[in-house]
Image: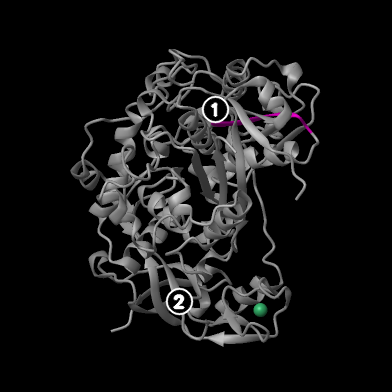
Amino acid sequence: MTAKIKEFPGVGLRESDFTERKVLFTEWKPDARYAWDAGVAIGRYLAELKEGRIIGVRCHHCRRTVVPPRIFCEWCFRPMDEWVYLEDHGVVNTFSICYVQWDMERLEEPLIPAVIEIAGASKGVGILHLLGEVDPREVKIGMKVKAVWKPAAERIGAITDIRYFKPIN
Amino acid sequence: MGLRKVAVVGAGMTKFVRRAQETGKELAYEAAKMALDSCELTLDDVDGVALGTAPDAFDGVHMKGEYLSDGAGAWRKPFMRSYVGGGTGVFAPIQGWYHVASGLFDVCLVVCEEKMSSCQPHPQGAFLTIFDHTTERPLGPNLLWIFALEMNRYMQTYGLQKKDIALVSVKNKRNAADHPCALLGDPNITVEDVLKSEVLAWPVQRLDVSPVTDGAVALVLAAENVAKRITDKPVWIKGVGWSLDTAYWTNRDLYYPKYVEYAARMAYEMAGIREPRKEIHIVEPYDPFDYKELHHLEGLLLADKGEAPRLTAEGVTARTGNMPVCPSGGLLGVGNPIAAAGLMKVAEIFWQLRGEAGKRQVPGKPITGLAQAWGDLMQVGTVIILGIGG
Ligand SMILES: [Zn+2]
């Protein structure tokens, strides 16, 4: 059929058609605000972060210890059995060196997001965070890293109570 | 299972463009009308409509499915809108399939539309809300992170280089040069061009990524008795599968898409396929990024783990190779209007199996093809297998 059709519908416009108002369009900017409750499990997680600790949960059925915590095991579909304090260090599972922000504006200093496997959790279980105090060229998968906490007085019970993770020498 | 046979009997699509003058509703109409015309049906022949399109926030239109419905041919008909992230374009025809296979409808129109250009300054503003609002979004993520983290894990696991992966982008953008609707076809692109393109989020560079796109695609599905009246070249839906992994994505190893394997196994079983590498002749895996094509070929069991780059380097996946992969040009070349991009892949298999793909036609008269899509938090796999004869 594509072989038979000579002209397909669809008119492509250029950016200049908008900037120079050659086409008509309407704009709208929503005022959409939300306040998300942390919930039971993440509520405790955040409260522990405020104290400078990382906490996970353990399921006795599948014997996994996972973080971020959750009140139920999604594998076994039963309640988690216990809270478990984890270490505030771990291993880089994967990372990126990111030069753009969400609107594609360029960053002067790249961000280094990483999945960090947290010591004390089951193998391969990590959280998303950032790396810091490291030359981007030196970052490697498998690198050991440690949480750099905000001072206790500045912690509010948020994932950003950890500023970033830095390499352990 | 007591299911009826279902065929694809018609297809239509718009050009894929960076920013379309047409509204989403107009794009949906153009694709749907072309699909119906292609098999000489009218809206009166359609029993129900399955629509795939991104969430409302993306377009700033609440109940966007209902907004699009008139363009999708749904006036006074049973109408269903689904969205499973990037997997939508292959899920929508699966939804259409079960409505016909179950006996509920004889003819189902499947329409996928996406207008990504409306969201300002960038559709990522809507996308990035997929990250967990409490544990991830305060870190300032953007959607590229997902791909960069997964790509790096994949490369590290198998010791792959960027040049091994860039071959996919080159192949697909060259293939797209033969697609009349393509946004980014380029017959002369080289691996060096990809490797020299701007680094966005290492290891992801500009030419590793498919672009923001507007477009629509539609298919007409029909039950066996109707299909045989409509066409002497029905393309049967032989198998479907889909699977969703956990949203706790930092708790699983991103090097391999296990959920794609589950989806593929479900579809192979339904299609009676025991040796996919011999029985699948042509493949349209989801390729919003170049490494994803490789990742998905492995998840679909069409390449051994870590071996898809070698197949690409050896030309096995070229349009003239033993297993053509993305002969359409894929998302990397034709463009990536999310839901429409996935359905474009299904349409390509339809055209290829009927021998109607024009300059893109693969040699060797393929009789079985597979299209697959992927999305969410690296989470969902959707698979459909089409075949002629039997
Ligand atoms: Zn469990």
The residue type indicated by label 1 comes to Ala
According to the picture, the residue beneath numbered tag 1 turns out to be: B216
Do we see residue A108 in this rendering?
Answer: no
Q: Position of residue B166 (x, y in %)?
A: 27, 48
Which of the two residues, B268 or A83, is positioned nearer the viewer here?
A: B268
Secondary element type, mark 1: strand
Give the left or right position of residue B19, taking residue A33 as reference: left
Q: Position of residue B120 (x, y in %)?
A: 50, 34
Q: Is residue A142 above or below residue B321?
A: below
Give the quarter of the image for residue A26: top right
**Could you tell me which residue is drawn at 46 percent across and 58 percent down?**
B301
Q: Is residue B132 above or below residue A139?
A: above
Looking at the rendered structure, whether the residues under marks 2 and 1 are on a common chain is answered as no
Disc on res. A131: none
Which of the two residues, A114 or B30, is positioned nearer the viewer here?
A: B30
Which of the two residues, B179 or A165, is positioned nearer the viewer here?
A: B179
Give the alpha-carbon distance from disc 2 to disc 1, as whole Å.
Answer: 41 Å
The span shown in magenta is B105-114
**Could you tell me which residue is drawn at 66 percent across and 73 percent down?**
A75
Secondary element type, mark 2: strand
The residue type indicated by label 2 comes to Glu
**Could you tell me which residue is drawn at 42 percent across and 80 percent down?**
A90
Q: Is residue A139 above or below residue B23?
A: below
**Could you tell me which residue is drawn at 65 percent across and 42 percent down?**
B94
Q: Position of residue A73 (x, y in %)?
A: 68, 75
- Residue B109 lies in the magenta stretch: yes
